[in-house]
Amino acid sequence: MRIKLLVAALVAALFFLPVAAAPIIAEGSASLDAGVTAAREMAIQDAMQQAALSRGAQVESAQYMNSGEVSESSSLSAQPLAGKVNVLNERTQDGLYRVRIQVDPSEPSSHSGISAARCSSPNGRTLRRRVITAYFNVDRPAEASDLDALGVKLPHELAMRLARQGSITARDAGTLTVMPNGYLADPVLGAAGARQLALTADVQFVVAGRIVSTAVTERSLRLSLFESDKTGQQQGVAYSGPFSAMTGGALIYRSVARRFDMELWIYDGLTGTVLTNQSLTTLAKGDVEPKSPLPFATPEFWRTDYGRQIDTLLDNVVEQVTSTLSCIPFSARVLHVENGRKVYLDAGGMDGLQVGDKLLVYRQHGDATLQTPVSGRLLGVPETLLGDVSVIQVQPNLSIAVVQDVRAGVQDGDLVRFISKR
């Protein structure tokens, strides 16, 4: 019986494994209205979507009001495919750019997956996203009285850690917050503040959040010799029996467990959309409440049991931020257009751009962010794809590009997004 089961398992493995790893052939198309380069990129994306749908799709539907009438919209969606993408052939026909691709799931690709390493390094190099960290409101300041200026020092620490990642240029906003006031806790209410902060600081993303709790959760008695029975916040009862003058003995309630709960908010600075709203928590045991307050994020603080737990938590925050931002296309703004052909961009070599890079050009339709009618969730700002430009000169913080194929003229304030070579 066991032999039969083993044979059946081997047959099943031989039958299913090639199917799972078999290359997928798909075709896609896009209009040539925005030029050949832009159309090629859109056609490849369309083909990759068709390949993903061929592996299985789900139907999503939603109802909305239109001029007092209820309408319904349905769409197909599928999980993106991971694997190497090869363009088999491409051509223009009937005003469309058509491509035929092969996706090989058995081979890794720098354009697939969600890890920071794969998303942030197109063609073996890094494009640095610009980030600013805003003030973190402390919900219960009395609990954090021994953590001096926590709301300012935590984002400052995050900015320094993010800057060390190599894929992010980060700085902190000091006491500036995205929220209209400190009593609000829904990150969606900080959308306007995030957009304004991103515009003022010339960044692509805003990292903010709040400290929910730093409460002590457990205390225990311990014997103390030659120290006050009320050292810091550790209260107790002094011993007054024999030899008390010699020992200075006391029983003290010592904090032995303390939590650190926070929320992390990541905003798209262009639209104010909340990309991440995540709760993170940790519990430290041992040395969690020093005899005298230690400034947050100092070497002495990190050496405490409480500090070590928060240190690990912040490493997880940095990983979350890096992973989220790395898979969002790098973008910059057009500062100035000269003679309709030469375009000056607010990003340069420090951001990872190189001579020869191609970027798609987009124009926003006003600055009104679309949102869902029921929940009010922000979705984004409508854009029109205009065409593409090619970088011809790179300075540390400035690039000059020339218009390659743009059907409408490029204007100051237009957006450009990086195109990975395929």
Image (tube, rainbow, N blue to C red):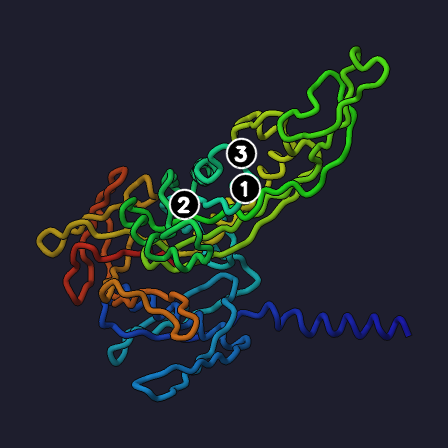
Q: Earlier in the sequence, mark 1 or mark 2?
A: 2
Q: Which of 114 and 202 is in front in this view?
A: 202
Q: Which of marks 3 and 1 is in front?
A: 3
Q: In this view, does 33 lie above or below 110?
A: below
Which mark identifies residue 314?
Answer: 1
Do we see residue 118 in this rendering? no
The quarter holding residue 189 reads bottom left
The quarter holding residue 398 reads top left
Query: Separation of disc 3 and disc 2 at Cα?
Result: 39 Å
Q: Which of marks 3 and 2 is in front?
A: 3
Residue that sits furthest to the right in the current view: 1
Q: Which of marks 3 and 1 is nearer the N terminus?
A: 3
Disc 3 crowd, CA 10 A, few/some/many (<14, 14-19, 20+): some
Disc 2 crowd, CA 10 A, few/some/many (<14, 14-19, 20+): few
Q: Specify the quadrant that holds the C terminus.
A: bottom left
Q: Tell me the amino acid under the disc marked 3.
A: Leu
In this picture, residue 161 sits left or right of residue 287:
left
Residue 200 picture location, percent across and down: 27, 46
Q: Tell me the amino acid under the disc marked 2.
A: Arg
Q: Residue at x 39, y 40 (%)?
A: 170
Which residue carries the number 2 mark?
Answer: 125
Query: Separation of disc 1 and disc 2 at Cα?
Result: 26 Å
Which residue carries the number 3 mark?
Answer: 147
